[in-house]
Image: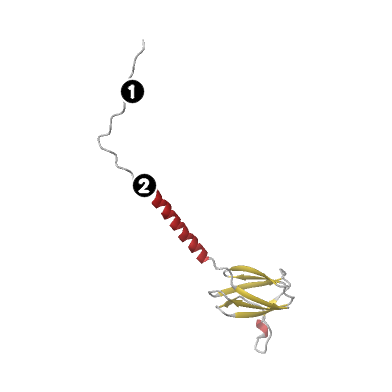
């Protein structure tokens, strides 16, 4: 004896379902635009240390060629602490103030320094980052 059960389909909805709007493309385009804006802002904010450094044996000239003022915090020569950095001696230099101290350079300003060693490499630390310059 076999019983026959009929498959009864579910009842039809009384109100037709509203068609869903397809927002997927709008979300993708909005995500791409926001991503590009974010990348642009990050690139604009990145401003590496823009210094021009010239060396003649033990004398160094550091110039700010960037777009904003920069403060030079420290200068290390040849990765050695025994290579001192001083201001050059002139007729107008106070002998008590020859030691290098942090200096702010406006755009276009330069500072001259003298080392006790021949300058091969200079590590310059600024308020905007640090950079290493090599000379041969």
The residue that mark 1 highlights is 7
Of 95 and 114, nearer the camera is: 114
Element carrying mark 2: loop
Q: Residue furthest top?
A: 1
Element carrying mark 1: loop
Instruction: Mark 2 and mark 1 in contact? Answer it, CB < 8 Å.
Output: no
The residue that mark 2 highlights is 22
User: Relative to residue 15, is residue 39 drawn left or right?
Assistant: right
- Residue at image coords 42%, 54%: 29
Q: Is residue 42 above or below residue 15?
A: below
**Quarter of the image that includes the C terminus:** bottom right
Q: Residue furthest left?
A: 14
Give the mark nearest the N terminus, 2 or 1. 1
- Residue at image coords 47%, 57%: 35
Q: Residue furthest bottom?
A: 91
Badge 2: residue crowd in 10 Å (few <14, some 14–19, many ≥20): few
Q: Quadrant of residue 58?
A: bottom right
Counting from the top left corner in percent of width and height, residue 46 is at 54, 65
Of 19 and 88, nearer the camera is: 19
Counting from the top left corner in percent of width and height, residue 44 is at 50, 66
Q: Quadrant of residue 86?
A: bottom right
Could you say which disc has been placed on residue 126 in the image? none
Badge 1: residue crowd in 10 Å (few <14, some 14–19, many ≥20): few
Q: Colour scheme of this structure image?
A: secondary structure
User: Relative to residue 28, is residue 119 drawn left or right?
Assistant: right
Counting from the top left corner in percent of width and height, residue 122 is at 68, 71
What is the distance, in whole Å, between disc 2 and disc 1 at their CAs?
Answer: 34 Å
């Amino acid at each position: 004896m076999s019983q026959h059960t009929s498959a009864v389909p579910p009842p039809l909805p009384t109100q037709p379902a509203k068609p869903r709007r397809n927002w997927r493309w709008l979300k993708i385009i909005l995500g791409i635009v926001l991503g590009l804006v974010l990348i642009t802002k990050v690139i604009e904010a990145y401003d590496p240390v823009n210094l021009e450094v010239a060396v003649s044996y033990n004398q160094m000239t550091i110039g700010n060629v960037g777009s904003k003022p920069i403060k030079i915090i420290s200068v290390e020569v040849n990765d050695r602490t025994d290579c001192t950095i001083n201001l050059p001696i002139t007729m107008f230099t106070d002998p008590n103030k020859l030691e290098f101290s942090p200096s702010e350079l406006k755009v276009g300003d330069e500072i001259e320094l003298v080392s006790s060693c021949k300058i091969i490499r200079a590590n310059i630390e600024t308020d905007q980052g640090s950079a290493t310059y090599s000379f041969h």
